[in-house]
Amino acid sequence: MFSVADFIAEVKYAADLVAQTRGCALTVSAVDSRLAFSGDRDQLYSAVGNLLQNALKFTHHHTEVTLDAYALSDRILIDVKDHCGGLP
């Protein structure tokens, strides 16, 4: 088991530098400190890191990328949103 709040803080720390170099704002919502995962932290970090990296790489310059983690029913959801406009 590991804390979702700590996990998201770690992901944010790693992505902040990329956001700064791309001229984007990275906004991370507050995460309920009671939320916890049971699973492979490294695989989850790789997946979320890849989503954030792509969002920061392809979003329009000087826009915002958001990262949210929250509980919905019996699941924990992690959302990454950007302003890239989608694929053609």
Image: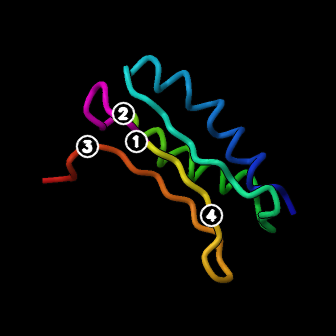
Of circles 2 and 3, the one toward us is: 3
Q: Secondary structure at mark 3?
A: loop
Residue under numbered circle 2: 57
Circles 2 and 3 in contact, beta carbons < 8 Å: no
- Work out how far the residue at label 1 is from the one at label 2, CA to CA, in angstroms: 5 Å
Residue under numbered circle 1: 54
User: Of label 4 and label 1, which has the lower sequence position?
Assistant: 1
Of circles 3 and 4, the one toward us is: 4
Which of 45/9 is in front?
A: 9
Residue under numbered circle 4: 70
Please state the horizontal and vertical placement of residue 67, each as a whole percent of the image.
Answer: 52, 48
Farthest top residue?
Answer: 21
Please state which amino acid type lies under the numbered disc 1. Answer: Asn
The answer to whether 52 appears left or right of 48 in the picture is left
Image quarter (top left, top right, bottom left or bottom right) of the N terminus: bottom right
Majority secondary structure in the magenta region: loop
Please state the horizontal and vertical placement of residue 11, each as a whole percent of the image.
Answer: 65, 40
Please state which amino acid type lies under the numbered disc 4. Answer: Tyr
Please state the horizontal and vertical placement of residue 80, each as a whole percent of the image.
Answer: 46, 52
Residue under numbered circle 3: 84
Query: Which span of residues is magenta-colored?
Result: 58-65
Please state which amino acid type lies under the numbered disc 2. Answer: Lys
User: Of label 2 and label 4, which has the lower sequence position?
Assistant: 2
Circles 1 and 2 in contact, beta carbons < 8 Å: yes
